[in-house]
Amino acid sequence: MRLAIGIATRGRPAILAEVLRDLGRQTRPADRIIVCHVTPGDVGAPLPGIEYLTAPAGLPRQRNAIMDRAADCDILLFLDDDFLAAPEYCAVTEAVFAARPDVVVTTGTVIADGANGPGYTVEEGRALLAADAPPAGQLDAHPHFNGYGCNMAFRMAVVREHGIRVDEALPAYAWYEDLDVTRLIGRHGAILRLGGARGVHLGAKVGRTPGLKLGYSQIANPVYLARKGTYPWNRALRSMARHCAMNLARSPRPEPWADRWGRFRGNMLALTDLLRGRLRPGRIEEL
């Protein structure tokens, strides 16, 4: 099978370089590694063996550009530009796709996720991987609701057959774009979480969406996807309520890495727009 790795990046050249070097440790090397950036400064000095292309800013646009470039591949593995994959990641992913023709999306096991905290340095991420103990059955897999955007693989034959795209109505960081696209692909087969495909999401704070815009997206995007039919309303409502409550509760004493008050203001602005009938994900570009 031809396996490509796609990385959409913006504003993290130093971390990206470390991630790309780390991919050289894969026991099953990717046939292609495709990096989509917006400006030359996003990637720094090009590395040999890497394919670089540009696209307009926005995660969905960049990921669609990668999907177009990787159209001749069997598997496309999307990794975030701050995700460190264990050496067996690609081998396990390919083995599961080969053994299970019904599988259309896989997502790995994130052994540590810096997005939920202050983040990890590259050195800390490598140490966490070195200390990790993978399961005895490396091909163990379990049904999952959706793929997680920092590490998710698609069966490209299904993507091509059904013309599936990442929704560009979700701009910028594109909150829940991973959920949307993997649920669309998942209509045609199984979505699995792989126990043996493991990694660390560093959760770098450089290049993140500002608090106000992120807070708006935490409301606007679930509503948009629920109306679209890719996100059940019961899950969307729980997600919105959880984030509003968390942002409000933590606003008086926010974490150093999170603009909780800005997020809560964005939540409230989105709810106001919902009541006024003008809520849409693209509104964050006007904020």
Image (cartoon, grey):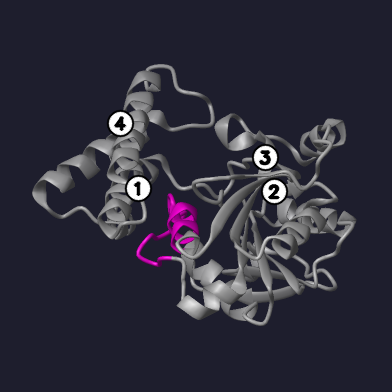
Relative to 239, residue 147 above or below = below
Cα separation, mark 1 vs mark 4, equals 13 Å
Query: Is residue 11 in sight in this rendering?
Result: no
Range covered by the magenta-colored residues: 167-184
Cα separation, mark 4 vs mark 2, equals 29 Å
Q: Quadrant of the N terminus?
A: bottom right
First in sequence: mark 3 vs mark 2: 2
Q: Which mark is residue 185?
A: none
Hey, which quadrant is residue 156 in on the image? bottom right
First in sequence: mark 4 vs mark 2: 2
Marks 3/4 in contact by CB < 8 Å: the verdict is: no
Of badges 3 and 2, nearer the viewer stands: 3
Q: Secondary structure at mark 1?
A: helix
Image coords of residue 242 (percent x, y)? 36, 29
First in sequence: mark 1 vs mark 2: 2
| 46 sits left or right of 244 in the view | right
Cα separation, mark 3 vs mark 4, equals 25 Å
Going 58% across and 41% down the picture, which residue do you hit?
Answer: 205
Badge 4 is on which residue? 241
Badge 3 is on which residue? 110
Badge 2 is on which residue? 83
Q: Nearer the viewer, residue 210 or 248?
A: 248
Badge 1 is on which residue? 217
Cα separation, mark 1 vs mark 3, equals 24 Å
Asked if residue 173 lies in the magenta stretch, the reply is yes
Hey, which quadrant is residue 132 in on the image? top right
Q: Secondary structure at mark 2?
A: strand
Of badges 1 and 4, nearer the viewer stands: 4
